[in-house]
Image (cartoon, helix red, strand yellow):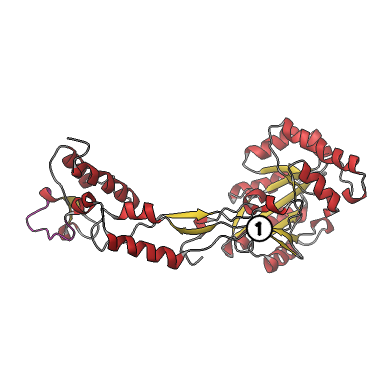
């Protein structure tokens, strides 16, 4: 059969459409495709006898079967339906979500941008064209990037993700002790959550293999300076050394890190500029568990739950309080419909498609 045969063109369109519908593996469809390829059947009929969603080649339908949709391939072969295209364009205009540029906030400093979302008119049209008239449209969506991102803001600290992104992130700063790391990792594993671990260089230098194991589980490994000093009180040379030494350790275990969390949250503008010159973003936090004060785990959960909102970065350490509170914090985030991702995932402009069940979200 000639590749230019209109039936072959129709078959191409139909195959794509059926993949979207998820029915391309049914025996009837396989038989139909084979028929078209061999020069046989040229349409697909849904039969009432087979029930809703039952499909068979037109030639194989039983005499009593009532056709519900016919002449599929002929619409595709014509390759033009202005009314259908206009319908898709109108829906795209109505449901478009514009992108948000990264911006500076007086309190929260650098706020990441967020991709917009809209219907891909061309792809949707091409998939919809071969479908029977009146079929639900197989909308295909695409993300639209903002014109300004974090890099356009220069050397600025980041305290949170975009407030319209339904995601939060767990920040675990590790500077000393690892007694509670196994239980925290077990909770994260059980809940299928990836966190961002900020390692103090002194601890990291003694625990490179352990850090590699943490990274192998899908967690993000990042820079927490070398010896937990207050960065704002250091000379420029010393501050650079603190960040560089830990960065070199991370590189030693194959980590390409882009984040820096200053110890105790202490920093000044020079600290941010030094990190920026090393291609690192300075990361703070939105909500602090204050677990080092040994609060009751239930109090930690209650505090985090009351303040939890899209874009939040939650600070904790490998302590008894945080370890015991971690399951409750994760449960609270999921109950509020929030995804949990690494800090890099949170501050990226990418949307969270698995949580967007409608264009209204």
Residue 251 visible within the image: yes
Tell me where residue 334 appears, x and y as whole percent: 58, 60
Left or right: residue 143 compared with residue 268: left
Tell me what residue is drawn at x 89 percent, y 49 percent. 230
Q: Nearer the viewer, residue 135 or 172?
A: 135
Q: Nearer the viewer, residue 243 or 177?
A: 243
Left or right: residue 92 compared with residue 325: left
Tell me what residue is drawn at x 25 percent, y 57 percent. 53
Tell me what residue is drawn at x 58 percent, y 49 percent. 192
Residue named by callout 1? 102
User: How many labels sit on residues?
Assistant: 1
Q: Is residue 251 above or below residue 345?
A: above
Tell me where residue 16 appears, x and y as whole percent: 31, 47
Residue 226 visible within the image: no
Tell me where residue 91 appears, x and y as whole percent: 39, 65
Rendered image quadrant of residue 239 = top right
**Magenta: predominant secondary structure element?**
loop
The residue lying furthest to the left in this view is 63
Tell me where residue 99 appears, x and y as whole percent: 56, 60
Left or right: residue 311 compared with residue 127: right
Q: Which residues are magenta?
A: 60-70
Tell me what residue is drawn at x 16 percent, y 50 percent. 43
Residue 66 on the magenta span: yes
Q: Secondary structure at mark 1?
A: loop
Rendered image quadrant of residue 303 = bottom right
How crowded pointer 1 is (Cα within 10 Å; few <14, some 14-19, many 20+) is rated as many
Residue 295 on the magenta span: no
The residue lying furthest to the top in this view is 252
* Quadrant that contains the N terminus: top left
């Amino acid at each position: 059969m000639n590749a230019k045969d209109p039936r072959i063109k129709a078959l191409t369109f139909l195959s794509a459409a059926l993949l979207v519908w998820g029915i391309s593996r049914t025996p009837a469809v396989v038989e139909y495709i084979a028929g078209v390829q061999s020069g046989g059947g040229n349409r697909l009929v849904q039969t009432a006898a087979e029930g809703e969603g039952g499909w068979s080649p037109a030639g194989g339908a039983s005499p009593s079967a009532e056709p519900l949709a016919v002449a599929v391939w002929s619409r595709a072969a014509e390759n033009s339906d202005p009314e259908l295209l206009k319908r898709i364009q109108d829906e795209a205009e109505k449901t478009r979500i514009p992108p948000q540029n990264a911006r500076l906030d007086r309190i929260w400093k650098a706020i990441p941008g967020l991709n917009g979302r809209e219907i891909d008119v061309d792809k949707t049209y091409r998939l919809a064209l071969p479908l029977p008239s009146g079929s639900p449209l197989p909308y295909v969506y695409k993300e639209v990037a903002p014109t300004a991102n974090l890099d356009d803001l220069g050397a600025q600290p980041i305290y949170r993700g975009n407030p319209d992104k339904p995601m939060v992130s767990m920040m675990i700063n590790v500077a000393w002790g690892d007694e509670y790391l196994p239980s925290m990792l077990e909770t994260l594993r059980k809940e299928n959550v990836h966190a961002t671990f900020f390692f103090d260089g002194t601890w990291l230098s003694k625990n490179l293999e352990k850090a590699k194991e943490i990274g192998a589980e899908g967690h993000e490994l990042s820079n927490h300076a070398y010896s937990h000093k207050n960065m704002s009180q250091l000379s420029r040379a010393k501050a650079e050394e603190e960040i560089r030494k830990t960065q070199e350790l991370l590189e030693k275990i194959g980590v390409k890190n882009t984040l820096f969390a200053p110890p105790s949250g202490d920093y000044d503008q020079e600290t941010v500029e030094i990190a920026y010159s090393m291609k690192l973003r300075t990361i703070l936090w939105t909500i602090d568990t204050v677990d080092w004060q040994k609060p009751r785990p239930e109090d930690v959960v209650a505090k985090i739950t009351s303040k939890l909102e899209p874009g939040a970065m939650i600070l904790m350490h490998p302590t008894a309080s945080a370890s015991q509170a971690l399951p409750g914090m994760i449960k609270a985030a999921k109950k509020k419909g929030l995804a949990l991702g690494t800090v890099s995932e949170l501050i990226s402009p990418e949307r969270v498609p698995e949580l967007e069940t409608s264009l209204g979200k």
